[in-house]
Image (tube, rainbow, N blue to C red):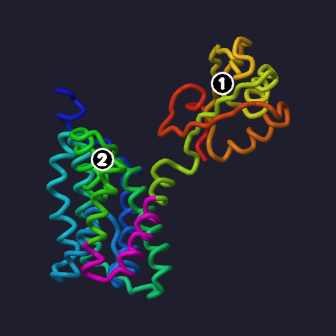
Amino acid sequence: MNTIHSSINWKEIFRPKNILLNLLGVAFITLALKGFMIPNKFLDGGIIGISILVHEITHWPFGILVLILNIPFLFLGKRLLGKTFALQSFMTFLLIAVSMTFVHIDAVTSDPLLIALFGGCLIGVGMGLCIQSGSTADGVEILALLTTRKIGFNVSEVIFAMNTLLFLAAALSFGIVTALYSIVTYFAAIKSLDYIADGIEQYTSLNIISSKSELIKSLIVKKFGKGITIIKGERGYLPENFDVKFDCDIIVTVVTRLELLRIKDEITKLDPNAFMYIQYIKEASGGILSHKKKH
């Protein structure tokens, strides 16, 4: 059996950075829910959204609902991602339940647009911080991972399908306007979560094909301090001259979103006809990236 799944990494759980990120994440989630969403019956997606819906219909304590509805997913998390992840996630669920039960926050506003945008952004930031700490604040992501393996859809498609049903239920319970604003809240949360979980410096693969490849190689390495990989290829094969072809170097470099525009502008100055295409990548590590200082 894989030791990652069969043992608990206590050092990882009690790492100060992870504890701090988790506490900050729960604080943002609590502020979003108590200060914006619950007082105005706005939903997010996933288990938190289901908990809000059930809370408004039955008036059962929201904190208890979040904990109880998330617990079944811990067993899935343990099987798919290991005991350490399951325990960290349980601690997150428990913290959310406690903060939602005992922390008092007055409603910040009743303006629906402000609630949708700020409530969504805050809860997205909170969930992203929890993910950075090694846990999850919503068990539906674990369910989506399992469903993906069974039926072949990707995680985003599964979560979207689940939340479509949730927002339909919200429309029936709270009215179509509230349901529509809840969808805005959900998308604001997703975008904020992406930025926090992936980082504002999410890595991007920039691929360049140019007749001035040597100049571009020097520019990327010497001016911007980036590593490059060269793939040997052929260019040509145009419709009017299909038999004409040339050997070429395909330059591949991994950059952040903050660096991408500047590098593209400099390449265009060297060769206005350079062909560039971009591939967004989920994660990159090792190589020259491992020597970069964190901001």
**Which residue type carries mark 2?**
Ile
Q: Earlier in the sequence, mark 2 or mark 1?
A: 2
Instruction: Name the residue: 69% across, 33% down.
Output: 276
Q: Residue furthest right?
A: 269
Q: Is residue 180 magenta?
A: yes
The chief SS type of the magenta part is helix
Q: Is residue 56 left or right of residue 292?
A: left
**x, y (%) of residue 250?**
67, 21
- The residue indicated by pointer 1 is 228
Residue hosting label 2: 13
Give, as a three-letter code, the residue at label 1: Ile
The CA distance from mark 2 to mark 1 is 36 Å
Q: Quadrant of residue 264?
A: top right
| Residue 254 in picture, x, y percent from top left | 61, 33
Q: Position of residue 189 (x, y in %)?
A: 43, 64
Image quarter for residue 253?
Answer: top right
Tell me the residue at 45%/51% (across/down).
197
Q: Which residue is located at x 71 percent, y 15 percent?
A: 248
Residue 236 higher or lower than 63, as above or below:
above
Position of residue 244 measured from the top left corner of the image (x, y, whole percent)? 74, 12
Q: Is residue 246 left or right of residue 11?
A: right
**Residue 246 in sight in this render:** no
Which contiguous range is marked in magenta?
169-190
The magenta stretch spans residue 65:
no
* Circle 2: element type: helix
Q: Quadrant of residue 28?
A: bottom left
Q: Nearer the viewer, residue 164 or 189?
A: 164
When the figure is inspected, residue 13 is found, relative to residue 117, above or below; the finding is above
